[in-house]
Amino acid sequence: MSITFVTNEDLYKLVIEPVARATAFVWIGTADIKDLHVHHKGNVVSFLGVLDSLTRKKVLIRLLHAKEPGPNFRKSFDKYPMLWDNMERQICPRVHFKHLIVDGRFAYSGSANLTGAGLGIKSHDTRNFESGFITTDPATVGEIMDQFDEVWRGKYCRSCRRKSYCIDPIL
């Protein structure tokens, strides 16, 4: 059990790399999402390729984000047909948290979106200044999962005053 504060380049190693080792599920919450590129099995690939390889192992992927991704993400997404039916995806314009949960045993919460500048392999001189924490503490992981799941299930949809911005309502 631990809670560790992480910043900048360490986010990539300590947040993105554990995703490839998931065995049951990966939940990702982000405000902004782009075609993030990562190191995987000796190559640089779209993060979607990592998620695709996980779905082939029957790992459940949930992606919760605030707005439609850009054209580069969509082009990459089209290359991974396994994700089309096997990655659950929801949009909520109120999502501003950045969470990444792996197997209910590891979690990240912080400022970095799922973008190259936030969590990708961009260079020291071009990436954003980001921070957050990673944890394996069961209680803390549980609280992060609870927040994600409440939004995922639409707990706040009925009373939401931002419905006019919601292009695909959860409820």
Image: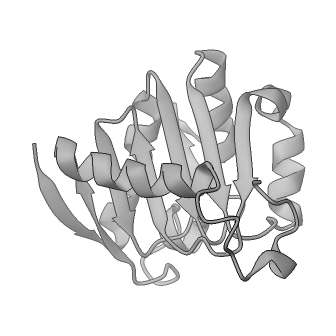
- Picture colour scheme: one colour
Which residue sits furthest top? 57
| Quadrant in the rendering for residue 33 | bottom right
Residue that appears at 77% across and 33% down = 83
Image check: 12 left or right of 83? left
Q: Position of residue 154 (x, y in %)?
A: 64, 55
Is residue 99 in view?
yes
In which quadrant is the C terminus drawn? bottom right
Residue 139 percent across, percent down from the top left: 19, 47
Q: Residue at x 60, y 35 (%)?
A: 61
Q: Identify the residue at horizontal 39%, vertical 31% (top origin).
A: 103
Taking the image as shown, residue 33 lies to the left or right of residue 121, namely right
Given residues 77 and 1, the one toward you in this image is 1
Q: Position of residue 159 (x, y in %)?
A: 67, 73
Left of 159 or right of it: where is 20? left
Relative to residue 111, is residue 72 drawn left or right?
right
Return the residue nearer the eye: 163 or 59. 163
User: Where 49 sits versus 154, above or below?
Assistant: above
Which quarter shows the N terminus?
top left
In the displayed structure, 61 sits above or below 133; it is: above
x then y, percent, for residue 165 = 83, 79
Residue 13 can be seen in this image: no
Residue depicted at x 58% and y 28%: 60
Among all residues in the image, which is located at the extreme front? 159
